[in-house]
Amino acid sequence: MNPQVTAGPWNFLNFRPGEQVTLAANTEWVDDVVVPQGWIYKNVADQTVQVEQFLVGQLTYMGVPTARVPELGERVANGEFYGHYSTRANTRFLSFNMADPNNPQPAVDEEGNHLDQGQHPIFGGYTADGVATPGGLKVRQALNYGMNFEEINEGVFAGLGIQMPTHSRPDDWAFPTGLENYPYDPDMANQALDEAGWVDEDGDGVRECVSRDYLSVDPAFAGSPLEFELLTNAGNTSQEALGVLLQDQWGRIGAKVNFSAIDFNVLVDDLVGQTYDAIMIFWSFGFPFDPDGISAVFATSADIPGSGFNTGSYYNARVEELLDTARTLPGCDLEERKALYGEAYTILHDESPWMWIGIAQTLAVGQLSIEGWDPHPQAAAEVLWNEESWFVAP
């Protein structure tokens, strides 16, 4: 036997790490005739370089970086390129680590017993029996109140952003009716930090830990500054702008944020390895939307350093109960499932293991040499749904 690796209309041809993946037409594909001889996915980490390659014709198709949407959108309107707008985009999120980043541990052992994962010195955590420590929750909520999305929308989303309150888009069927975003409210942010036991005692503009909740876990937390590292992927100019804005906004409420943009592969290693304080990255929602997808992100079964996506070590027994019930509900009544998922999404909003920052109206552009450009709004891949039918004229 000599099985081939296939991807629908394509067969794998070769992979050049950091450069590109090359696919060849699958001549035995049963659905249709594959028109292109192949398909090359280029890996261009720097978005400025990516746009320049498209403008000189080295790329046939691309998703436009947010900061360049107005410029490329105008050129689409002038007939220079094909273009397709969509709001079915990835969400920008920020993950808080709620365990000890210096000693990552899985949530449970082989028998399902909760393990002691330690506590993050700022974002809190859980006791060995799964009970949340209250101080970290207040800090996470304070950072939500301290985020000025209006500034972020202009500086990051080019005015095309939609703020997100939870792990679901507002137009998805399971989105909880009436759930609202955290408002920008510095007074609420400062109050929450005061209540959490973070006070600027020396007047240097950075709060220090005086909380009994933290000190009962580790007395060494006493007097430690409200200071943490925020990471994102280098080369994405809008993500880098977002990090600078959050650094400034949170500085106004007494948090010192050490922001860095690092290599994407290193970032993912830190994220999955659970060795970070806070990380900003993207999460892609599937189509059609699967509300149970949060099980892969916030269930204890996904809290495994090195392989799971519950990288912040979040735990809530009620959320897991709701997901289990909704997943196995006899008859699968849609309204009953919506209520169950809605409660789970509301808890996630309130406890904020992530900050769901927002999604943006996105723009995909293609060269006019493409024959077969026919975006379909109801397809999972709105532009590429018929890629096997494309022909690129020389």
Image (cartoon, grey):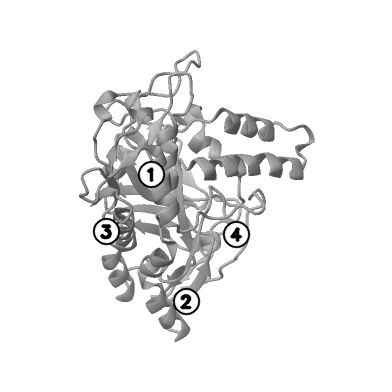
Q: Amino acid at mark 2?
A: Tyr
Using the image, tell me which numbered label, if any, was put on residue 311: none
**Direction from residue 113 to residue 327 in the image, left or right:** right
Among the two numbered marks 1 and 3 on one chain, the one whose residue lies closer to the N terminus: 1
Whether residue 144 is situated above or below residue 295 in the rendered picture: below
Q: Measuring 26% from the left and 43% from the top, which residue is drawn there?
A: 266
- CB contact under 8 Å: marks 1 and 3: no
Nearest to viewer (mark 1 / mark 3)? 1
> How crowded is the residue under tag 3: few (<14 C-alpha within 10 Å), some, or many (20+)?
some
**Residue at the spot x=35%, y=23% of the render?**
216
Nearer-N-terminus badge (1/4): 1
Give the labeled residue for mark 1: 193
Q: Crowding at label 4, few (<14), some or many (≥20) Cα neighbours within 10 Å? A: few
Q: What's the residue at 43%, 29% (across, down)? A: 133
| Residue 117, percent from left and from top | 37, 23
Q: Which residue is mark 2?
A: 82
Circle 4 sits on which residue?
379
- Residue that protrudes farthest toward the bottom in the picture: 78
| Nearer to the camera, 75 or 103 | 103
Drawn side of residue 67 relative to residue 292, left or right: left
Cα–Cα span, label 2 and label 4? 18 Å
